[in-house]
Amino acid sequence: MRSAMILGLMGLAALPAWAGDPEPPAYHLAISDHRFEPAELAIPSGVKVRLVIENRDATPEEFESYELNREKIVPAKGTITVFVGPLKPGRYPFFGEFHEATAQGALVVR
């Protein structure tokens, strides 16, 4: 019982170390008429970021990138979050697999 209480207190002592970490900055993409808007999105290098992707279309789309190693369905009229990074400077293409001819974009990391 006493050892469990000590372990519990030790866990509480560690709480501020991770509880105060700031959430990664958010960058927004929209899918409209089966196209990503903006088609190129600039983000900083060396930083983990949140991509908030809103699908304004009435059909689902997929956010996919071989370079980012990400693949996630964006429901019709829905929003998803994808975490990426930290990344080195460069251009990281992504596409929508369901409408690949039009749904093209890239992260430009500076």
Image (cartoon, grey):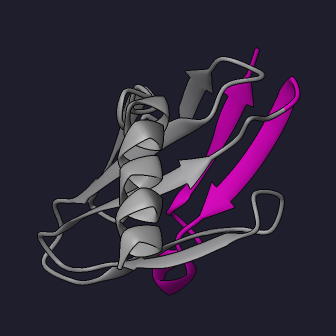
Horizontal and vertical percent position of residue 51: 44, 45
- Residue 94, compared with residue 92, is above or below; it is below
Q: Is residue 110 above or below residue 40?
A: above
Give the residue drawn at x 27%, y 61%.
33
Q: Is residue 59 left or right of residue 44?
A: left
From the top left corner, tell me how far across and down residue 13 is, in percent. 42, 38
Q: Is residue 9 magenta?
A: no
Looking at the image, which residue is at 47% across and 57% down?
82
Vertical placement of 31 versus 109: above or below? below
Q: Is residue 65 left or right of residue 33?
A: right
| Residue 89 image position (x, y, % from top left) | 86, 23
Residue 39 appears in the picture as rendered: no
Question: On the rendered image, what quadrant is the N terminus found in?
Answer: bottom left
Name the residue at 75% across, 20% down: 45
Relative placement, left or right, of 60 versus 51 is left
Compare residues 1 and 58 and report the one nearer the observer: 1
In the image, 17 versus 60, the foreground residue is 17
Residue at figure coordinates x 87%, y 29% from the top left: 90
In which quadrant is the C terminus drawn?
Answer: top right
**Residue 50: quadrant of the picture:** top left
Q: Which residues are magenta?
A: 88-110
Residue 89 is one of the magenta-drawn residues: yes
Q: Is residue 49 visible?
A: yes
Residue sitting nearer the eye, 32 or 2: 2
Up/down of 30 relative to 71, above or below: above
Q: Toward which corner of the image does residue 77 lie, by quadrant?
A: bottom left
Q: How many marks overall?
A: 0
